[in-house]
Image: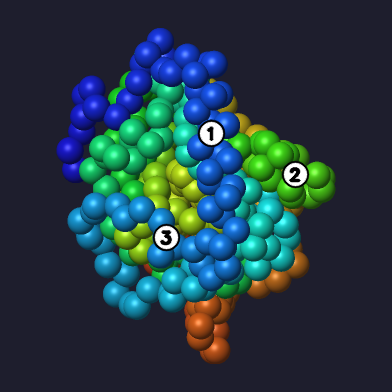
Amino acid sequence: MVYHPRPSWWLPEREATPEPLYLNRRAIVGSLALAAAVPAVAATGVDRLAKLAHRRTREAGEPPTPLADVAGYNNFYEFGLDKADPARRAGSLRPSPWTVAIGGLVKKPLILDVDRFIARAPWEERVYRFRCVEGWSMVIPWVGVPFASLIQAVEPLGHARYVAFRTLGDPEQMPGLRSPVLDWPYREGLRIDEAMHDLTLLAAGLYGRRLPNQNGAPLRLVVPWKYGFKSIKSIVSIDFVATQPPTSWNVASPREYGFYSNVNPEVDHPRWSQARERRIGEFRRRPTLLFNGYPEVAGLYAGMDLRRFF
Ligand SMILES: Nc1nc2c(c(=O)[nH]1)N[C@H]1C(S)=C(S)[C@@H](COP(=O)(O)O)O[C@H]1N2
Ligand SMILES: [Mo]
């Protein structure tokens, strides 16, 4: 892992594209993207996406879930509640140009120009198991960088203890925002040491290409030892904060969705068991593993009662 004290892909706030130019570019690129999106979503659309140069740094020890399932069976409530909705409807999302504001309790806030970041970051391919709280799972070859490399660039202050993430909340691009199923925009959070863990990925792609819109283009989080909903999609802001931030699912139903949401076969969801799961593409269910089979994170929770902090 190489740390960039002054990475080439970030823009200090004052160097970010001025607003009028930015809005203008966005309108032009947006209409092109919209025109191209209609045929692209017919299948998975992934073959049309730009390739990302990467080196594979982690295997899962089992074959990846077929691309058609990874990009065709999704949870992205901004585009509807059915698993097929995101692939059918996320063509209205315009992932380029895109910026992510990274700030809060940091020494060097920055506005990430995502296209520049994608062109320059040292991408790695990591094949991770991915477990949804609903009881299904996949094996996905993500392309990302450790989130920790970003932390190095902004230099969090000593009293920053959590990281709060927010998804785009634009009803024009996201038709699902018209239904009040969640308190939009979608929000998630991690403790700062969880965010720093080497497994935590900021992903820009899968299967060697840029993320399909339905998987959270242009940038999303991947936290493989937690239930899938912690892996927030289409991020527009990242804030370092002192206290545990509110998160969409925890606000919607605190009894069912805790802040930690570590995969744990011994702590059932109030409405169903979490002991087993079904890999998409398989028939028989298999046992769910503690921390989704990533025991190297156990130290983050030493001394914590995982039933209480579920
Ligand atoms: N913004 C946003 N992020 C989200 C969601 C969502 O509805 N909105 N769904 C979550 C849930 S429940 C899961 S299981 C994963 C699904 O990711 P995938 O479609 O790439 O497999 O995304 C998570 N991130
Ligand atoms: Mo999920």
User: Can residue 155 be seen from the camera position used here?
Assistant: yes
Closer to the camera, 235 or 31? Answer: 31
**Residues at badges 1 and 2 in contact (C-beta under 8 Å)?**
no
Vertical arrangement, residue 289 with respect to residue 228, above or below: below
Give how far across and how far down residue 128 sits, in percent. 37, 63
Look at mark 2 in the image and give the residue it sits on.
177
Neighbour tally class for label 3: few under 14, some 14-19, many 20 plus, Cα within 10 Å: few
Whether residue 266 sits left or right of residue 179 in the image: it is left
Number of marks drawn: 3
At x 70%, y 71%, the residue is 272
Residue 192: where, in percent of width, then height?
43, 34
Which image quadrant is residue 152 in?
top left
Q: Amino acid at mark 3?
A: Arg
Residue 304 image position (x, y, % from top left):
50, 47
Mark before the other along the chain sequence, 3 or 2: 3
Disc 1 packing (10 Å; few <14; some 14–19; many ≥20): few
In space, the residues marked 3 and 2 are separated at their CA atoms by: 27 Å
CA gap between label 1 and label 3 equals 20 Å
Provide the residue designation for mark 1. Answer: 28
Label 2 element class? helix
Q: Amino acid at mark 2?
A: Leu
Above or below, comparing residue 192 to residue 209 in the picture? above
Q: Which mark is residue 48?
A: 3
The residues tagged by marks 1 and 2 sit, at their Cα atoms, a distance apart of: 24 Å
Mark 1 or mark 2: whose residue is earlier in sequence: 1
Residue at disc 1, secondary structure = helix
Residue displayed at 49% across by 48% down: 217
Residue 173: where, in percent of width, then height? 66, 42
Instruction: Find numbered disc 3 in the image and state the secondary structure of the residue it sits on.
Output: helix
Q: Residue at x 63, y 48 (%)?
A: 92
Give the left or right position of residue 193, taking residue 98 as reference: left
Q: For the point 56% across and 63% down, which residue is it?
A: 39
